[in-house]
Image (cartoon, rainbow, N blue to C red):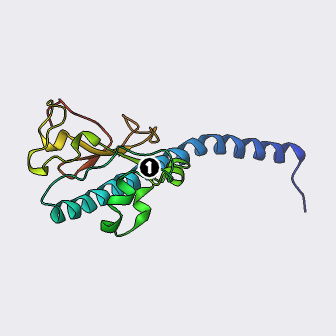
Amino acid sequence: MKGFTLLEVLAAVVVIGILSALAIPTIRSGIGRADSAKCLGNLRALGVALNGWLSDNNLMMPPLAAGRKTRDEDLPVIDTVLAPYLSDPRVLACPADRVLAAASGTSYYWNSVLSGQSAANLNFLALATDLSKIPVIVDKEGWHVHSEDKVNHLFADGHAANQLRLFTDP
């Protein structure tokens, strides 16, 4: 019975190394896209929680601060005001966020320009009144490097997307 020669073993190791070098970026890209999709789902869940708030508060947008740096700050923010309306508090953390959600309570910012406005007549800086173009909640950082804007957005009409289109046609 004949064994493998050193040259054959080295050739096999080189081939495995080359295949690994080609596969790892593809796997990382797939994980990044999966994180982005999960984040979009989180934003949709936050939209459902926001609708719960709106139905309990005469369709007035909650008076929230955009965000906070630490949980120690006593501010009305997404993770405190919308918490009673969430079915799962884990939606407050984007899967691609490894730091901010733990420190501040959430991976997302609230568009504080909308605070206190009537949901029936939202106006974003007098520039956009189309609900499908008004961002309500957005990622705090550009974690999604595999998407065009690197940031996911929840819009006032309830849809979530990874592209911000304030002034473009649908």
Q: Which residue lies at the image location 59% right of the left edge and 45% below the top edge?
A: 23
Quadrant in which residue 20 is drawn: top right
Judge from the rendering whether residue 62 lies leftward or rightward of residue 96; answer left or right. Answer: left
Residue 62: x and y in percent read: 24, 53
Residue 44: x and y in percent read: 29, 56
Quadrant in which residue 54 is drawn: bottom left
Residue under circle 1?
Answer: 107
Q: Helix or strand or loop: what does disc 1 sit on?
A: loop
Q: How many marks?
A: 1
Q: Which residue lies at the image location 64% right of the left edge and 44% below the top edge?
A: 19
Residue 63: x and y in percent read: 26, 50
Residue nearest the viewer, comparing 140 with 27:
140
Judge from the rendering whether residue 123 lies leftward or rightward of residue 165; answer left or right. Answer: left
Residue 71: x and y in percent read: 49, 53
Judge from the rendering whether residue 4 lies leftward or rightward of residue 164; answer left or right. Answer: right
Confirm whether residue 95 shows in the render.
Answer: yes
Q: Which residue lies at the image location 13% right of the left edge and 57% below the top edge?
A: 59
Residue that protrudes farthest toward the front in the picture: 74
Residue kind at label 1, given as amino acid type: Ser
